[in-house]
Image (cartoon, coloured by chain):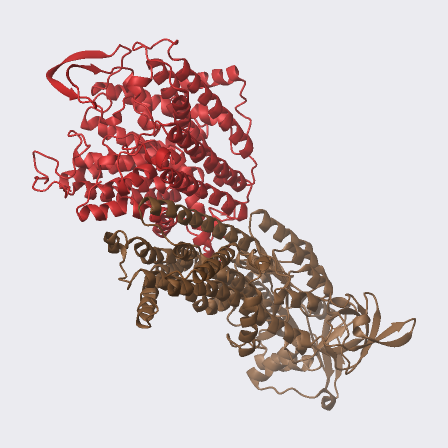
Amino acid sequence: MSSHANRRSLFDGKIVRRAFFDAFAKLSPRLMMKNPVMFVVEIGSALTTILLIADFATHKTGLRFNLQITLWLWFTVLFANFAEAMAEGRGKAQADALRQAKSETTAYRIIKGEVHEIPSSQLRVDDVVRVTAGQMIPGDGEVIEGVASVDESAITGESAPVIREAGGDRSAVTGGTRVLSDVITVRITSNPGETFLDRMIALVEGAERQKTPNEIALNILLAGLTIIFLLAVVTLQPFAVYSGAQQTIFVLISLLVCLIPTTIGGLLSAIGIAGMDRLVQHNVLATSGRAVEAAGDINTLLLDKTGTITIGNRQASEFVAAPGIDERTLADAAQLSSLSDETPEGRSIVVLAKEKYNLRGRELAHLNAEFVPFSAITRMSGIEVDGRSIRKGAVDAIASYLQQHGSGLPTEVRASVEKIARSGGTPLVVAENGCALGVIHLKDVVKGGMRERFDQLRAMGIRTVMITGDNPLTAAAIAREAGVDDFLAEAKPKDKMDLIKREQADGKLVAMTGDGTNDAPALAQADVGVAMNSGTQAAKEAGNMVDLDSNPTKLIEVVAIGKQLLMTRGALTTFSIANDVAKYFAIIPAMFAGVFPVLNALNVMHLHNAESAVLSAVIFNALIIVGLIPLALRGVSYRPMSAAALLRRNLLVYGLGGIIVPFIGIKAIDMAITALHLA
Amino acid sequence: MSLNGWLQITLFIAAVLLLAKPMGIYLTRVFNRSSTFLDPILLPCERFLYRLTGVNPEQEMRWTEYATAMLVFSAATMLLTYLVERLQHILPLNPQHLPNVEPFLALNTAVSFTTNTNWQSYVPEATMSYLTQMLALATHNFWSAAVGMSLAIAFIRGIARRESKTLGNFWVDLTRGIFWVLLPISIVFSLALVSQGVVQNLRPYDTSKLVEPQISISSDGKTSTITTQTIAQGPVASQEAIKMLGTNGGGFFNANSAHPFENPTPLTNFLQMLAIFLIPAGLTVTLGQMVGSPTHGWAVLAAMVVLWFAGTFTCYWAESQPNLMLHGVNQHVSELQSGGNMEGKEVRFGITNSALFATVTTDASCGAVNAMHDSFMPLGGMVPMVNILLGEIVFGGVGAGLYGMLIFVIIAVFIAGLMVGRTPEYLGKKIEAYDVQMSMLYLLIFPLIILGFAAISVLMPTIGLASLANHGPHGLSEILYAYTSATGNNGSAFAGLNANTPWYNNSLSVAMFFGRFMMIIPMLGVAGNLAGKKIVPASAGTFPVTTPLFTLLLTGVILIVGALTFFPALSLGPILEHLLLRAGHAF
């Protein structure tokens, strides 16, 4: 399914309405304290409000200006709260969609062989339930008996049913999914409210959101800058008094609020929540924000060959006939021998023969043939039809079979076998009536577009390593074809683990995907471990992300989302700090030109008067938060390129742009409020 | 501005850049304890010193131990200086029979020299005996410079080492800095200065008859005729060399490098400026060498050169302007005069070398002066102040400049590093919460102390404003400059402010102390934390710290974070004064 299916419009009416009210609820100082920058703005707003009331009571002049300043200061806080509420609202909407899958169902609990009907909310760990076709699975669990097809579209969006069976890597079932056929017995593995889905929903909603390491560091930087500018503004008043140009508290607080990094301070948590949200839109759930951040830092990507880089199964790609044998004869024999071979390889041989020589697949029943199934002893399969005895199998198996018939494997055939093996393919030799006909080239087919993706990853500085159980020769050939940087052949789970540890010892961060129980230790060890939703419970517990679509290639998108999250933070921080230049040129001359008209030389924007200048800067400062909400929620645009190129581009856009934009914005606002006679 | 002036400025920076590489490579060898050509003489001395003091040179120190050793050493040397000052009357080498130094002044001076500030609230030739100058002050010039260099090396090790708990051995770094670097260069430099006429003796002061007697009118209206002049003497050359090389700046005479016995010729002036930048420029190359990325060292040096040029250009331009208040006076450049604003400048240096010297001495934390910054044009005088306010990271003090610059590098990498979509990395080290926290603490000290004390001073008319010679924006500049110079450990004075009062002596002592040690401790904390980290290998995704773009970014962050902090205060000081002067008001 498309990974964009869950995308919703940025300003969904319902979400906006809810966010509007949440913005006020978030004014509680207890909540504001978590954000030092905006907390300072709130204190400033409260202070000006008190002074305004006092001014009003004593009929002081300048009420119109002071009132406007006070209002815009409150708007600054509210806009920031609104941004956070918007991000949370979008998260909640996602969570609601997920939660629908979790409505109360009836469970059929088995105790000592008897079935009891109870509400699913009363199920506890280790309870055993029976689920029959048409019923909802009442909770997360593991199939302990039976096999069934399950509709998991409620959580994955994928409409095709999946098979769930006892034992092995396909035993995990998720609460809220529906059994379509057969009966399974499930052992419940989590209590209600603690299921996998519950935890994920809580995270998406932002209820359990904890600040990520990078967010903490950035918060410290912003708090530090706030203190620096606080010092600059607090000490300015004595200097102003000395110079005979004392300032009002309203103007000083305006200057402070304009200087402290409110833009990034107001949008920081929204950026974090939106990052999680984007991941969910791609149908990936993360167990922590930390994992999303780590995804951006990945140095090495471990990708399983099968299913990720290649399309899962080997396919016949070529018939190489033995000397003196017509290729068509070989294809015909190969097709015949594969007619009842239901493996993907077998089917691909039938298809290739049809494509190349227009040989149509024949029905076995009509042929009166006898099928020889593959056995571990002969290691061959084949067919007996019309006196023809066709066999196909691995080289050494066929070689010994031919020897029994008094002939041997021709050297030419042996040479083709070696050539195919060297190129990364798997040779299957076909023999008829004790005589070798030729070789079928079974090939791993690399998915389309993989090479381009690996090139992009390389440009981003990420090394890809292919993990495969194949022999080194085959692995090398596929690695070359797919364009990965490195490969691990004949990999056992322990080798994977060792590779991760080795990379991490070098200071690198490693990401991988996995689904089996034997992947669990490696998934836990990796910095980003994406478990497939189709995988076992153990794998899902071990990883820090779950892909509901079970699409291993998505790891690449996950990395991009992580990078985008960090870039958005950096871009808005840079923008916020660069904004200060223009604000100085607006406010400083406005503060002092009354007493020292020469300072009007600094009024490079030619703002109308002192009041309009201060007001314009404060309004710009508030409006830019709203203006940047879409950017914070969507993330800055990201195309894979080298760090140097990214830096150049973003510095130009957000650094230089951050210096220029406020000059234009403040001037425009000044013209507007002058026209409206507000100052 | 003239072609001749620009040629001199170009010659100067060319010499600095030419010497940077050999100096940097030499410093790397010294602090890595590799072999150098001075080893045959110095190794035995080093070994003897360690045996004498019981130092085990192989023992590595954690950052806390390194900081403790540094603090203990600084405290001990500060106490020694205080005692020598307080007892100079009974100690030898006092031919002028100068009395003991007053307690507050003695403390201020001890703090001043320990912190590499060399702020002088006194007239040296009338206050300090030869023994005090040599034993207490000149030795401090070596010690405080070597301490700064050790700290910079410790910081570089923090960046270069991987998963290490330690930063080296303070005693070894200190010893090698003095023996291998400061002493040999100072000896050669002193001899060069003597050859140009800088004095070096222990004689009592000379008295000579004036060719043209002067009439003096005292404040109560009495007139007297002055017929003789006292000419101060002393071991000047030996102190002058380390004063410049160690970016100390404490003059042997009150007139500092404007005095003909300290800085007699254009050549000595050139060498003195070169000596200020010699080690700081070399250390950037050392940085590149020790972290294994020579280009990064050059990128940092490039940022310094850009900021140096901006300062030099502004100051030279401002001082070349004719003073608008001198109507009808020819102030143009000609063969017979320097032109421009010559008030408070030496004729033998002229506009170019006064402006360049003022920029260089405040880029670095030297503080020696060859012209009176107080008499500069408002914007010309703002350049030294801004240079110090930026944190003296343009070349900067010996060692202190580099570690200050590296704190800015960390902040720049953190802010912009996010924009490449990774947790910010500096040379493979991840910049995390602790590093940001310590770096911000470092950056907080400057505005806290400078703006804080200046604000308190202007609020107290009897204590803070009474010592001001000027009012209006120039008066504010004088107070701001004093705290800026002290906190920045520069030591140059804007004059016009009598700082030898209990309030200024004590608050400036606190400013110097905090400006040095309260910044060193978080800086070492960052170094210690960085040393313990893994090094992420470089890839295409790594934040580039070797490109011109990085230099531009670093410069931008320094200007925005550094200068914007002080813009409001400056706008009421030098900027306002400049605009008022153009409108015809002087202060």
Residue A128 position by quadrant: bottom right
Image quadrant in which the N terminus of chain A is located: bottom right
Q: Position of residue B152 (x, y in %)?
A: 43, 34
Query: Compared to A258, does B178 lie above or below?
Result: above
Residue nearest the observer in this picture, A504 or B527: B527
Tell me residue B481's x, y (percent): 32, 37
The chain coloured red is B
Colour for chain A in the figure: brown
The residue at the point 29 percent across, 16 percent down is B235
Asked if one can make out residue A345 in the rendered structure from this viewpoint, the answer is no
Q: Is residue A415 visible?
A: yes
- Where is residue A585, by image quadrant? bottom left
Please identify the quarter of the rendering in which residue A362 is found.
bottom right
- The x, y position of residue A279, in whole percent, is 57, 67
Q: Nearer the viewer, residue B220 or B449?
A: B220
Q: Quadrant of the C terminus of chain A?
A: bottom left
